[in-house]
Amino acid sequence: MITTVAVGTGKYVEQHESSSRGEVLARYRHLRQICKRHHSDALKLLSQGAILHHARRLGLADGKTLVLDSMDELALAFDLAIYTAPSSRSRAIGRYAKSTRFASGSDEVLMLEAMCNARFAVVLAQRRHPSAGLIVTDLSRGVELWLMDEGLEMSLPVGAAFATRYYAPDRFVMTAGVGVPVDGALLMSAIESSPHLLRKPFAEAIEDRRFAEAVYRAAIADG
């Protein structure tokens, strides 16, 4: 059974539909600015070599030279560098969280905790939310989410699938700022390019840190 929730709150999205569009957008934009600052500061903990490693894995670098069609592609390497790491190493977002000193209960802490618990997912756009944003289904986890993203609200058609990393700092979820459109063929190509993913059910494969890399790589190759 599919339920509509904001991850981490256990509350149904419909309970919040009375919020005005202006109120929702103001809250979202405030949190998005905090998110951008956290991302910028977390990137400072990463070496050029670490970023180049992920860029090469995505086919975006030749040696120490970046080969990009757009800066949006580099954002995919940043996403992997910040949010993923082998099990034997800590993630950059976790190291950054330990290094910060924000006031307890502040939105900075709220946002950072949500970012540390980010999930990678393939989501399907179901409908527009009455206030703002979209109602999407996280296909691997079987939950509907209220997704706030001004760009996707305008550009993502109902019925379209999108791979992204999301987190829940409020009654809605937000993307980590990057993502790629996907379809069944692209997802299959991504999984087939990574034999270790082929041996896992989809719901288990998507929890593997290498799944996002495989999807991003396939999307870049697909153009």
Image: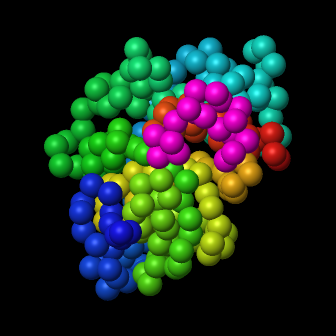
The image shows residue 94, relative to residue 146, as above or below, that is above
- x, y percent for residue 24: 39, 73
Residue appearing at x 70%, y 35% in the figure: 192
Q: Position of residue 217 (x, y in %)?
A: 71, 36
Determine whether, in the image, residue 105 is placed left or right of residue 59.
left
Q: Residue furthest left?
A: 104
Which quadrant of the figure contains the N terminus? bottom left
Q: Nearer the viewer, residue 152 or 213?
A: 213
Tag count in the figure?
0
Residue at 52% from the left image edge and 79% from the top image edge: 128
- The quarter holding residue 100 reads top left
Specify how the rendered protein is coloured: rainbow
Residue 137 placement, left or right of 184:
left
Percent from the top left, x then y, of residue 119? 43, 45
Q: Is residue 173 above or below residue 100?
A: below
Residue at screen point 27% across, 49% down = 110
Q: Quadrant of residue 7?
A: bottom left
Residue at x-position 47% and y-position 23%: 85
Please tell me whether residue 24 is drawn above or below residue 141 in the rendered image: below
* Magenta-highlighted residues: 187-204
In the foreground, 31 or 205 = 205
Q: Specify the quadrant of the image occupied by residue 59.
A: top right
Q: Report the magenta stretch's main SS.
A: helix
- Magenta-drawn stretch contains 5: no
